[in-house]
Image (cartoon, rainbow, N blue to C red):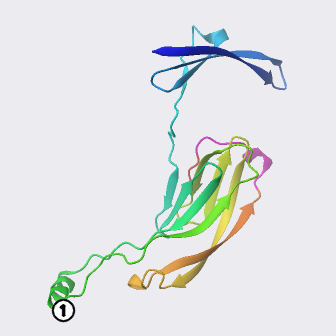
Amino acid sequence: DVRAMAVCYMTKNSSDSVGVRELLVSGGLDTKLCTYHVKHFEHHRPKRVWPFPHHPVASLARAPRLLLVQHRTALQLWQLPPLPHTPSSEAIAASSNDGDAVGGAQGGHQLLLELSLSRAVSSVVCSSISSDGRYVAVSDNSELKLYHLTHVHDEGMFGGMGGDDTISSMRVKRVALPESCRGACQRLLFVP
């Protein structure tokens, strides 16, 4: 059910034409907004704008077990504890004899980095982390930014399980992008 309608006037500035576009916006009980170009109302379907995030606000770098969490004006990078090892049948038998626990992650997650985007005029739209955890990309409504992360390793943060090194700190360096790649994005995804 439509409960409200409004016409917005948007200026159109491009190299070949200057003008005003009329945009019809409607909203209703389902909490989504629908937009229509008034000039093409009869020929085109509406664009829908949902009130909740329809893209992921967290991404995972599996191998280094890093979780990137997107907030309104900042990103947080968390180190997750290692997965528990799957015990062998001999280890299970030995643990039942001497009472020691087998497997199970020790410790918890650790905040490695909080990247504040305070210079951003608008909220963060999307973000992603590469599968190896070395790059983070983030976009607001005006610009795409890419950061290179250098990991500093330390042993034993989670009890030294399996001898895996864990990350104790990060160094962040912004990567200069070519002008043609600096535009705002709606979705980001690193591919192998």
Taken as a whole, is the magenta stretch helix, strand or loop? loop
Q: Residue at x 62, y 59 (%)?
A: 136
Write the residue at 73% across / 60% down.
Answer: 175
Q: Secondary structure at mark 1?
A: helix
Q: Amino acid at mark 1?
A: Asp
Let me know if residue 178 is in the magenta part.
yes
Give 95 or 185, whichever is nearer the viewer.
Answer: 95
Can you say whether 158 is above or below 26 in the image? below
Is 85 on the left or on the right of 2, as rendered? left
Bounds of the magenta span?
177-187
Question: With 53 as the anchor, is 23 left or right in this view?
Answer: right
Nearer to us in this view, 33 or 39: 33
Image quarter of residue 184: top right
**Residue 1: horizontal and vertical position, in percent?**
45, 15
Report whether 99 appears left or right of 64.
Answer: left
Q: Position of residue 17 (x, y in %)?
A: 83, 19
Say which residue label 1 marks. Answer: 98
Image x and y of residue 30, in percent: 45, 24
